[in-house]
Image: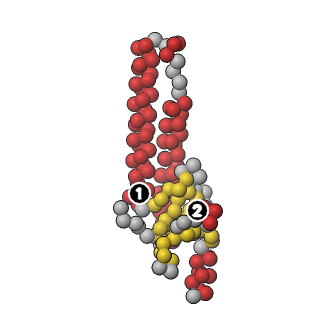
Amino acid sequence: MERKYFTIEAAQKLLPKIQSLIIQLQQLQAGVDLINQVYIDPDKTSYEDYMSMDTQLSKKFHKLSYDFYCELEKFDKMGILIKDLDKGLVDFYTKFEGRDIFLCWQFGEEKIQFWHEIDEGFEGRQQIIDLGEIKKEN
């Protein structure tokens, strides 16, 4: 898939939708994790009950997993990268001085305020104002 590039303004407009999708993904992931923790002791359950419970759990697991990946695909179609679902960390490609960089946003932040180089992670985040200062120096 071709990379999609965002302006700060365009990325900012998507934040309400992104917040909603992140919440949905986190809830679906929690459901999948919960099902994975269920243990049915076959020694304390009749075979029929065991098979029925196992089938129901399996169906629910697969349904939640399918829903999870359908929601995740929405990020891919929008051209947005999820870097850490638990933290709600996403990156948007943008161009600066002819090179690709990421606009970086984390769930809970009011607006997009940070960017970082493609080969750096969250630790390399810099305030967007830095982009203006770099531009003024050139």
Up-down relation of residue 128 to residue 37 (above or below): below
Q: Nearer the viewer, residue 36 or 10?
A: 36
The residue shown at (41%, 20%) is 52
What residue is shown with label 1? 76
Mark 1 belongs to which amino acid? Asp
* Residue closest to the eye, 66 or 3: 3
Give left or right: position of 129 versus 93. right
Relative to 105, residue 62 above or below: above
Please say whether residue 103 is visible from this viewpoint: no
- Work out which residue is located at the far left of the displayed protein and give it: 1
Q: Quadrant of the N terminus?
A: bottom left
Specify whether residue 3 is in view.
yes
Q: Nearer the viewer, residue 7 or 15?
A: 7
**Res 137 quadrant in image:** bottom right
- Residue 103 rendering spot, x and y as whole percentages: 53, 68
Residue occupied by mark 2: 121
User: Can you tell which quarter of the image residue 115 is in?
Assistant: bottom right
Asked if residue 69 lies left or right of residue 114, the reply is: left
